[in-house]
Image (cartoon, rainbow, N blue to C red):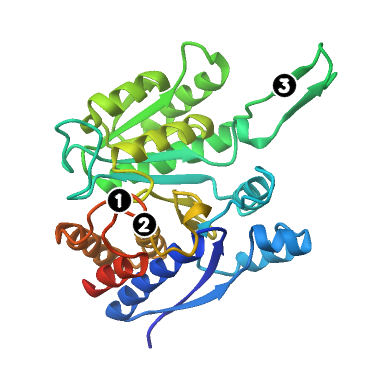
Amino acid sequence: MSKTYKIALLPGDGTGPEVLKEGVKVIEAAAKKNGFSLDFANYDLGGERYKKTGEVLPESVIEEFKKFDAMFLGAIGHPDVKPGILEKGILLKLRFELDQYINLRPVKLYPNVDTPLKDKTPADIDMIIVRENTEGLYTGAGGFLKKDTPQEVAVQESINTRFGVERCIRYAFELTQKRAKNNKLTLCGKTNVLTYASDLWQRTFNDVAKSFPAVKGDYVNVDAICMWFIKNPEWFDVVVTDNLFGDIITDLAAMIQGGMGVAAGGNINPEGVSMFEPMGGSAPKYTGLNVINPIAAINAGTLLLENIGETNAAKDVDAAVVKALESGKIKSMSAGRMGMGTDEIGDLIASYI
């Protein structure tokens, strides 16, 4: 009897439902080929629900998500909703409530995808960034004093715990060892200025490294890593960093792999339920036009399949993406310039499975 996995779908806002539809199409094809089933449940979280009901993320829904094998997100962000309400109320809240303490961002240049880096090829751009996802500046700790006066003070605190830092670093070491590419793990921080937090990260990194003698440890300041990503991306295998630095360098990394149209990520709880998503945002101006690139959502489906243990199916999806791009039928990664519709790209990739 084939195994069935329960997947929660969060289509969300803007073009989110369009790209998620193609992601589902492709992973369903991979599931059928590999002899297992996917049971989907749809959740209407996002801007339209908030506008109608005032609800952002009910507590009862969070409890429901804990019963799923994985979550698959389209995009969150609505032009008629004040920025921060949905992002904090859904995305950040899910990360904290479901303890999705790893943000995983593969950075891979696919064939026939343009990179702004001169003379760099897919052999040069192939790394994974591991970002701590539940601590740092994103905890919301801090406040105002004398707000809206000339003497106003704003304090934003970065909270870093040994527990949180260590589990993130240990995950990164284990991933580097499993990946077995260059067996090199780079810690990205700012030890020369952020004395306390970066010191905790560096000492923890050094301690955990003792359990992984086959992995070569490395350190690069965050400003320097932004330079080296551009000049020598081939130097990097796996990078581990804190929440804020990770948020910044993953967007830079997305550009060198060809843009947000191919960049996918996962919010991971290795002991619980994880959520996977394309990185491109809701792109509301393209809603309903069938011109948005679904490859990032399809790549997020690859991560989802890996996470539930269906590695052969994940490899099938990744190979199908490569074949589709090698075919030359997809002309660009930019919305409206792809030479094919959103649904046609989904069909093409599914056909290679």
Q: CA distance from mark 1 to mark 2?
A: 6 Å
Which of label 2 and label 3 is nearer to you?
2
Which of label 3 and label 1 is nearer to you?
1
Counting from the top left corner in percent of width and height, residue 353 is at 24, 73
Q: Is residue 84 visible?
A: yes
Q: Disc 2 residue type?
A: Asn
Q: Does 323 sit left or right of 81 as displayed?
A: left
Mark number displayed over residue 293: 2
Q: Does 59 sit left or right of 228 as displayed?
A: right
Answer few, some or many: residues within 10 Å of disc 3's Cα (few below 14, many 20 plus, some between 14 and 19).
few
Q: CA distance from mark 2 to mark 3?
A: 39 Å
Give the residue at mark 1. Answer: 333
Q: Nearer the viewer, residue 304 or 20?
A: 20
Q: CA distance from mark 3 to mark 1?
A: 40 Å
Give the residue at mark 3. Answer: 155
Asked which secondary structure carries label 1, the reply is loop
Q: Residue at x 25, y 31 (%)?
A: 233
Q: Disc 3 residue type?
A: Val
**Looking at the image, residue 27 lies above or below residue 218:** below
Asked which secondary structure carries label 3, the reply is strand
Q: Is residue 73 visible?
A: no
Q: Residue at x 72, y 59 (%)?
A: 50
Mark number displayed over residue 227: none
Q: Does 243 sit left or right of 4 as displayed?
A: right
Q: Residue at x 46, y 18 (%)?
A: 190
Q: Does 117 sit left or right of 147 as displayed?
A: left
Ranked by sequence position, the earlier of labels 2 and 3 is: 3
